[in-house]
Image (tube, rainbow, N blue to C red):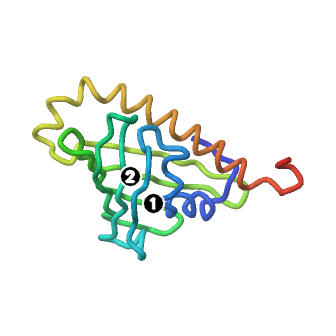
Amino acid sequence: MSVAASPERVFAVLADPTSYPQWLIGASEIRDHDADWPAVGSKFHHLVGVKPFVLADSTEVIAVDRDRSLKLHVRARPFVSAIATFTITGGPGGSVVCIEEEPAERTVGNLVRPVLDPMIHVRNHRSLRRLAVLLDRDVRPASDRA
């Protein structure tokens, strides 16, 4: 998804766990996060779903390349354990942001993947559109935001 924000700005939003409910479909509330987020091994604790049907779990950073990529182990157990990789390319005038999501457990994941992949693709595309709107709203000069 193309966005009108630099890779640094995109990464700043991904590095802010409190932003996820604003753009990531399914994220309903961030309960807490480690002070060193997004350092490898750090976590944020979240609620996933729509109230009253929510699950409490966490997301952990697996790898980080500042302003380029963020790889997360996303959990909403017992149903979801996935690896989500955000990649960012571009320059000062804009960026391309991608999400690649795959099951953390290949054995079980490969069984449900044919059914879930189309839904995950749609959710991720819609989430990236919401992220683009959030970034556009945040990067415009204050005089243009009124």
Where in the figure is residue 24, as x and y percent of width and height?
48, 43
Specify the label residue 31 is tagged with.
none
- At horizontal 36% and vertical 27% (from top left) the residue drawn is 119
Where 103 falls versus 12 (above or below)? above
Comparing 41 with 57, the one in front is: 57
Indicate the position of residue 49 as horizontal and vertical percent values.
37, 37
Q: Residue furthest left?
A: 107
Rendering coords of residue 61 (x, y %): 34, 64
Label 1 packing within 10 angstroms: few (<14), some (14-19), many (20+): many
- Residue 69's label in the rendered image is 1
Locate residue 100 relative to residue 83 in the image: left or right: right
Circle 2 residues within 10 Å: few <14, some 14–19, many ≥20: some
Number of numbered discs overlaid on the protein picture: 2
> Residue at horizontal 66%, vertical 50%?
135
Residue type of the residue flagged with mark 1: Ser
- Work out which residue is located at the far front of the displayed protein and give it: 52
* Dot 2 or dot 1, earlier in sequence: 1
Residue ID for mark 2? 85
Callout 2–callout 1 Cβ contact below 8 Å: yes
- Left or right position of 138 against 108: right
Q: CA distance from mark 2 to mark 1?
A: 7 Å
Q: Nearer the viewer, residue 93 or 103?
A: 103
Q: x and y percent of residue 136 in the render?
A: 71, 47
Q: Amino acid at mark 2?
A: Thr
Position of the N terminus by quadrant: top right
The residue at 42%/70% (across/down) is 37
Label 2 secondary element: strand
- From the viewer's perspective, is 139 left or right of 42? right
Q: Is residue 10 above or below residue 125?
A: below
Identify the element where label 1 is drawn: strand
* Residue at figure coordinates x 35%, y 49% from the top left: 84
Residue closest to the far bottom: 36
